[in-house]
Amino acid sequence: MLRTVSAAGIGLSFGAGIVVSGMGNPAKVLNFFDIFGSWDPSLMLVMLSALVVTFVGYRLVLRRPAPVFEPKFHLPTRRELDLPLIGGSALFGIGWGLSGFCPGGAIPALGSGAPAPVIFVASMIGGMLVANALRYLSLQRAAV
């Protein structure tokens, strides 16, 4: 129960940060990419702030023997770059640049009632379902 309440609190805090920073507004994100037009540097400031918080947070948290609500830390062990990682990163960047939404900004934007975040989130879920189906088919073929 405490784990769920903690996760909900962290998610609400993240969503509030997205809303307060304006990153739920796709025009603000797209203006960051428009360096010769109506450039808006606020996305860069949000990213730099996130890097500082992450850097400090990891240093403090990883000093603990274990997380608060888990028996051990679950950190990535793979270091190699593979096609799914590079392709997924490229697809994420292209989608973000075209739509102005990333998942972190689109989910809080659902509360606005505008159709654009609903379409984006529905498309994102559809893409995840297609990716999982393709991965499943790939594993099935490899097993034969």
Image (cartoon, helix red, strand yellow):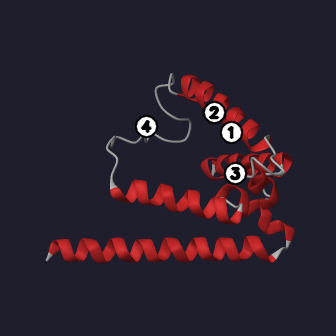
Q: Which residue is more in the foreground, 72 or 109?
A: 109
In the rendered image, residue 112, in percent from the top left (x then y), is placed at 86, 68
For label 2, the residue is: 51
> Earlier along the polypeptide chain: callout 3 or callout 1?
3
> Earlier along the polypeptide chain: callout 1 or callout 4?
1
Discs 2, 1 touching: Cβ within 8 Å: yes
Query: Which label is found at residue 47?
Result: 1
Please identify, in this view, whether the residue under mark 3 or under mark 2 is nearer the observer: 2
In the rendered image, residue 127, in percent from the top left (x then y), is placed at 52, 73
Residue 53, quarter of picture: top right
Q: CA distance from mark 1 to mark 4?
A: 28 Å
Query: Which label is found at residue 11?
Result: 3
**Vertical relation: 40 (above or below) 125:** above
What crowding class fits label 4: few (fewer than 14 Cα within 10 Å), some (14-19), or many (20 or more)? Answer: few
For label 4, the residue is: 72
| Label 1 SS | helix
